[in-house]
Amino acid sequence: MNSYSSYCCTEIDCAHAPLAERPDGLVCPNGHLFAFVPGTDVPMFVCEPEGANEYSRENAAEVHDNALRWVFKTFQTTEEDLRERLIARIGLKKGQRVLITGAGAGNDLPYLVRALGGEGDIYAQDIAKEMLLAGVSRYKAELAASGVSLHFSVSDATNLPFADGFFDAAYHFGGINLFPDIATGIAEMNRVVKAGGNIVIGDEGLAPWLVKTELGRMLINNNGLYACSAPLEALPATARSVKLSWELSNCFYVIEFQASTEPLPVNIDIPHLGKRGGTIRSRYWGRLEGVDPILRDRIYEEAERRGMSRVAFLESALRASLGKD
């Protein structure tokens, strides 16, 4: 059953204000209403138009199931083995709260429930209403007695309806290659997971050493998504403990990192020893206009004669000149 107090407004002017329940949906203090999907208790924040793609059609879950069976047969593994390996990377503990983005028809839900040891919360979201409702139909009743609370929403992974640091961990497998803005999707996971919480992301994408092999060319010919690279450039600059690996015969990338919104612990003001001197900051931001090369060499010689670094000598000379003025 959904805990509606956990959801926040996704409108830009509301700064993730908490939502209150009404008979027809969830409403924020500014009056933005997010209706329930008709006949359900699932809030709908945004939804792909019906028939917009293979995931928004009436039989989307069945089509996806067929595709998954092909994947597991092709890569000679089982769904259980793969999902257990992936979810083990999250390192979930009993009682934690986890988000799964792009949850689709909910195939990961039983494995996440198991990893939580019978206590905790799982929030499953997807922008494709048809897929998510298939997950509700398949697993809501089946897992009701598990001790783990399931919460579903039709929402946008690049604009999540949750407060900062609400989750202990986040997980996504399959679909991030199709995000209109992958960096924003990852940034949102980083935002809603508390500092130090694990985030695991995976999708089709050959390991670099396979791309130009015959097998790689055949896979890409069969499905262009295998040509995707792991989107490391889309990670937030604050990401910690980043790991990259591959699953399914090195044909699906997996990125793991720890959430953080704090700058990396790099001190850019430590002075360099040696002739040049300066710091990382001053060498980058403190560059001056070019001077006559003969004058430059004389400055370097004078700095060395005085036993000073070039930066220290230049700074002292400039300060002295400005002081006289």
Image: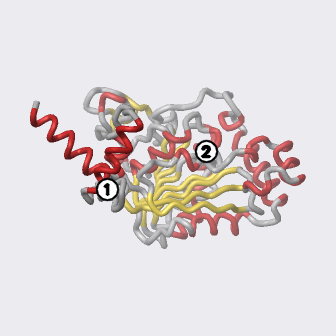
Specify few, some or many for label 2: CA neighbours under 10 Å numbering under 14, 14-19, or 20 or more: many
Residue at the far left in the pictured view: 324
Q: Secondary structure at mark 2?
A: helix
* Alpha carbon distance from label 1 to label 2: 56 Å
Q: What colouring does the structure picture have?
A: secondary structure
Q: Quadrant of the C terminus?
A: top left
- Residue 53 in which image quadrant: top right
Q: Answer yes or no: is residue 323 visible.
A: yes
| SS under mark 1 | helix
Compare residues 270 and 115 and report the one nearer the observer. 270
Identify which amino acid the numbered label 2 is placed on. Answer: Ile
Q: Is residue 287 above or below residue 199?
A: above
Which label's residue is closer to the chain start, 1 or 2?
Answer: 2
Please name the residue that numbered disc 2 is placed on: 176
Give the image location of residue 264, x and y in percent.
Answer: 37, 56
Q: Position of residue 143 (x, y in %)?
A: 54, 62
Q: Position of residue 324 (x, y in %)?
A: 9, 34
Q: Residue drawn 34% across and 44% down?
A: 298
How far across and how far down the image is residue 58, in percent? 69, 35
Q: Residue at x 64, y 39 (%)?
A: 178
Disc marking residue 119 = none
- Res. 165 in view: no
Q: Nearer the viewer, residue 182 or 13?
A: 182
Please tell me how crowded label 1 is: few (under 14), some (14-19), or many (20+) other residues with Cα within 10 Å: some
1 and 2 marks in contact (CB < 8 Å): no
Q: Nearer the viewer, mark 1 or mark 2?
A: 1
Q: What kind of residue is marked 1?
A: Glu
Q: Residue at x 83, y 50 (%)?
A: 212
Vertical comparison of 284 with 142: above or below: above
Q: Is 102 in front, or is 188? A: 188
Q: Which residue is mark 1?
A: 304
